[in-house]
Structures are given as structure tokens and as C-alpha cells.
Image (cartoon, coloured by chain):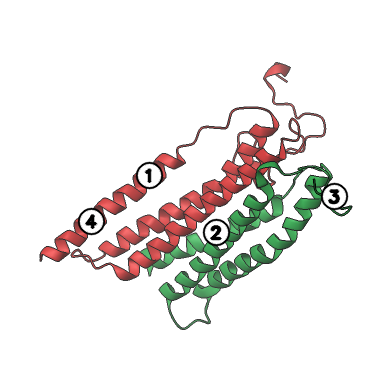
Chain colours: A red, B green
Amino acid sequence: MTDPASVDVPEEGEERVGSPHGGFGRYAAGPRRELGHEPDYRFTLANERTFLAWIRTSLALIGGGLVLFQVIETPVPGGRRILGGALVGLGTLLALRAYRRWVRNEEALRTDAPFPPTRLPLLLAAGVGLVAVISVVVLVAGAWT
Amino acid sequence: MARRRPDRPDRVFDEGLQQERTALAWDRTALAMLASGLVYARAVGPPYVRVAHLPVAVALGVGAAMLLLGARRYADLHATLRADRPVQRVPYVRAVWLGTVVVGLASTVAVVFA
């Protein structure tokens, strides 16, 4: 046994789920209710709406990617597969991260901690921007030839 | 001044209409889920009875459940807020998340590997 202070001892009544260092198992059970205090319900509902907004964004990317895959014609063979696949893949990635984000935000609310930082908005903006620019180039090039 | 009716709350229990906005967010997301399921079905194409179309059933099922349960939860939340009880809704959140992930992964496979 090492220095007791360095060991992550569960609080009384805390049920340990998965790895303490935060694999998905840590989040699968949802926010830890034994943490902190019950937040103001307005914040709980705001966090829930934010989760749903991420899910809608994800569904829009997935649907948009599927439509783009079917509709667009690219001069390069397989181009629509790459563009559509980028959108659908980005949407799937956002969906995968959304639950964890919701859990962590809920726990931050319970412990009065700041929301954990996230690069998801940057990823979303960069991904959609890139696909949009390439699509414009492809469409203009297609109109020219 | 309006006379107080006994079946009405005697105070504002949901300032900012949080409950209503949240219920509408669930409905919007349910519609997005239903629409993605249909777009996915269209993208994968016939024949419609095969494994590749299972995500369609998932999306339509989760979307319909969100609409139906959403209405009931809206009423539950009403009672919860009036009674000052904590708001707890983990299973719903996880089901929506799982449905979206299923549709997303299947769509990725459909576009990239089909």
C-alpha cells in the first residue's frame, strides 16, 4: 500500500464503474448521483437540451452525408464516397462523444466544477467547412467541363 | 385579478418554460431520428427485408418511442417540478444515444464500403 493520499479511494456509497481513468465504462452508467448535490433543474434540463442538440446535429450530418453520397457527381471516381463518408463519419463521431459529454457536464453541475473543455465544436466547424469547400470546387469544376 | 382555481398551481414553478422547451427539443430530435431512418432506408435501397435495414427499424422505433414517451414524460416532469423532486432521466438519454450511434455506424458502412 502506497501513500493513502495518492490512492483513489471511493467515497462512501460510491459504486466504482469501469476504469477510474475514464474508459467508456466509467460513463456507461450515467452521471454519478452520489457526487455533489442535486443541481438546479434548469441546468439539468439545459444540459439535456444541449445533448439533444448534439444528437440532432449528428443526425443532420449523417442524413446529409447519405444524401450527398446519392446526389453529387464528382469528376474523380469515388469522390462522392469520400465526401459523403466524411460527413457521415463526422456525424457518427459526434454522436459517439455526445453521451460522454452529457455525463461529464451533469457531474460538473453536481460538483460546481467548470464544464470540461471540448474540441467538438472545432472538429464540427473544420469538418463541415472542409467538405463544403471541396463540394463547391467539385461543383464548379463539374460545371466548367 | 383572476380568481384562483383550486386545480391550478399557486406559483410559477417553471420559470423560463424549461419543461416545454425541453419537451420540444425531444420532439425535434425524434423527427430528426425518424427522417434519418428514412433517408438511410432510401440510401441502402431495396430489398427492404435484410440485415442492412435493421438500423431503419432502430431509428423508427427510437424516434416513435421518443414522441410517445416524450408526451408522458412531459406530464411526469410537470408533477416532478411542482413537487420539487429532482429531475432524472438517464435511460431515455442513453437509448437516444445508442439509436443515433447505430444509425451512424450503419451509414458509415453503407457509404464507405457499399
Amino acid found under the numbered disc labelled 1: Ala
| Left or right position of A98 against B4 | left
Q: Which mark is residue B3?
A: 3
Q: Which residue is depicted at the point 49% across and 66% down?
A: B36
Depth check, mark 3 against mark 1: the one in front is 3
Amino acid found under the numbered disc labelled 3: Arg
Q: Residues within 10 Å of mark 4 (few under 14, many from 20)?
A: few
| Distance of label 2 from label 1 (alpha carbons) | 20 Å
Label 4: which secondary element:
helix
Q: Residue furthest right?
A: B6
Depth check, mark 2 against mark 1: the one in front is 1
Q: Circle 4 marks a residue in which chain?
A: A
| Left or right position of A21 against B9 | left
**Which residue lies under the disc numbered 4?**
A136
Q: Which residue is depicted at the point 15% across and 60% down?
A: A141
Q: Circle 3 marks a residue in which chain?
A: B
Q: Position of residue A86 (x, y in %)?
A: 36, 55
Q: Residue furthest front?
A: B1
Q: Circle 1 marks a residue in which chain?
A: A
Q: Circle 2 marks a residue in which chain?
A: B
| Distance of label 3 from label 4 (alpha carbons) | 62 Å
Q: Is residue A57 above or below residue A15?
A: below
Q: Residues within 10 Å of mark 1 (few under 14, many from 20)?
A: few
Q: Quadrant of the N terminus of chain A?
A: top right
Q: Nearer the viewer, residue B102 or A136?
A: A136
| Distance of label 4 from label 2 (alpha carbons) | 28 Å
Q: Nearer the viewer, residue A21 or A64?
A: A64
Q: Which mark is residue B100?
A: 2
